[in-house]
Image: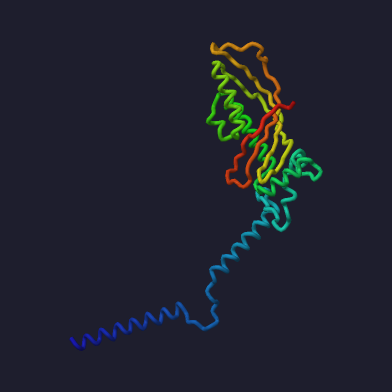
Amino acid sequence: MGEGYFLDIIFLAMVAGFIFFRLRNVLGRRTGNERPPPDPRTQKRSEDQSDEQGAANQGAGDDNVVALPDRSRPQAADNAEAKPEEEAALWADDSPIGAGLTKIKLADHHFEPGAFTDGARSAYEMIVDAFANGDRDALRPLLNDQVFDNFDGAMDDRESKGQTLETKIVAIKATEIIDAELKDKVAEVTVKFVSEMVTVTRDEAGELLPDQPGGTREVTDIWTFARDTRDRDPNWQLIETHGEN
């Protein structure tokens, strides 16, 4: 067994040496002149630059390629939409409303006349509708105490007589800021609403009361809204109402 065992070892050693020799010939040896392995980050940048260059070359003759805007050139001035003339006039130095709006803006940096006007328009529609329906819960957060008491008294009088009010706003033709003030951090903005509406009052039997205006009529309301600029609540309240005259 001893002699055969040593022969097996010698044979395995010869096989291993042969395999090593073949691998060396196939794989080669390092000489110090080989190129370093590629850096994945460098390769990625190179590929990106190549893709961008290819897209640029293709864009010259391909209508389906959309060129991105040059961000090195200011675009805001070219693309900014001009404010409506009436809103720009509100901020004019010689406008009687401009000083009040400027003071409100300084006290409340989120204040914008355009956004305020949109909100006042929505509030106008909600208040008119809630008053007609006798909805005190909807009116309460929109009105200050004095105006709410006035509205509540009118609704009580109507209900005590068994009358119902039907009001439909057909269109709001104009919503215009006509005054603005800042009184001890309380902003007050007065808005003129010109609307077309249908209003009728019915008795207990559902019959129209006499002398009711027929059809659609134009109504002008002057409403003043207020908000304490120190309050985190962004909502405004109606503090005064009267007609144009």
Identify the residue at horizontal 59%, vertical 30% (top origin).
148
Q: Considering the image in quadrants, where does the C terminus appear?
A: top right
163 displayed left or right of 101? left
Vertically, is 20 above or below 54? below
Identify the residue at horizontal 73%, vertical 37% (top origin).
179
Identify the residue at horizontal 69%, vertical 47% (top origin).
105
Residue 111 at x, y = what percent? 66, 45
In the image, farthest residue toward the right: 94
Residue 242: image quadrant is: top right
Vertically, is 138 above or below 232? above
16 displayed left or right of 67? left
Residue 167: image quadrant is: top right
Q: How many labels does the image show?
A: 0
Q: Considering the image in quadrants, where does the N terminus appear?
A: bottom left
Residue 130 at x, y = what percent? 57, 27
Compare residues 74 and 189 and report the one nearer the observer.
189
Residue 90 at x, y = what percent? 76, 41
Residue 203 at x, y = what percent? 57, 13
Identify the residue at horizontal 21%, vertical 88% (top origin).
3
Compare residues 172 and 27 and report the one nearer the observer.
172
Residue 145: image quadrant is: top right
In the image, farthest residue toward the left: 1
The image's colouring method is rainbow
